[in-house]
Image (tube, rainbow, N blue to C red):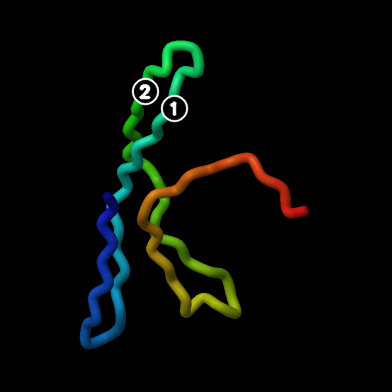
Amino acid sequence: MSLGLTIKGAEGIVLAAESRITLTVQNPETKETLAVNCDNAQKLLKFSAPHNHIGAVTYGIVIRVASSAY
């Protein structure tokens, strides 16, 4: 679970996010699942000019699978 906040104030909008992620991997031989927690993930993103007025907060389950664009 991720926590992302957007707060509208008198002078603008504030985006905030926590930084913990959990990575899991399964040993193919033993089928044991190992989990590792990291506390330095970047879930708050900003963009360069001319789009520096845009921000984004990421959250949710991400599954990385080897794939091809073709």
Q: Which mark is residue 25?
A: 1
Q: Earlier in the sequence, mark 1 or mark 2?
A: 1
- The answer to which quarter of the image holds residue 49 is bottom right
Seen from this angle, which residue lies furthest top? Answer: 30
Q: How many marks?
A: 2
From the top left corner, tell me how far across and down residue 2 is, in percent. 29, 53
| Drawn side of residue 28 relative to residue 70, left or right | left
From the top left corner, tell me how far across and down residue 55 is, in percent. 43, 71
- The answer to which quarter of the image holds residue 66 is top right
Q: CA distance from mark 1 to mark 2?
A: 5 Å
| Drawn side of residue 11 relative to residue 57, left or right | left
Quick one: 18 or 66, which is closer to the camera?
66
Q: Is residue 46 above or below residue 35?
A: below
| Residue at image mark 2 | 34
From the top left corner, tell me how far across and down residue 31 is, in percent. 42, 18
Q: Residues within 10 Å of mark 2 (few under 14, many from 20)?
A: few
- As helix, strand or loop, the secondary structure at mark 1 comes to strand
Q: Is residue 10 above or below residue 32?
A: below
Disc 2 residue type (three-letter): Leu
| Drawn side of residue 25 relative to residue 17, left or right | right
Are the residues flagged by discs 1 and 2 in contact, CB closer than 8 Å?
yes
Seen from this angle, which residue lies furthest bottom? Answer: 10
- As helix, strand or loop, the secondary structure at mark 2 comes to strand
Disc 1 residue type (three-letter): Val
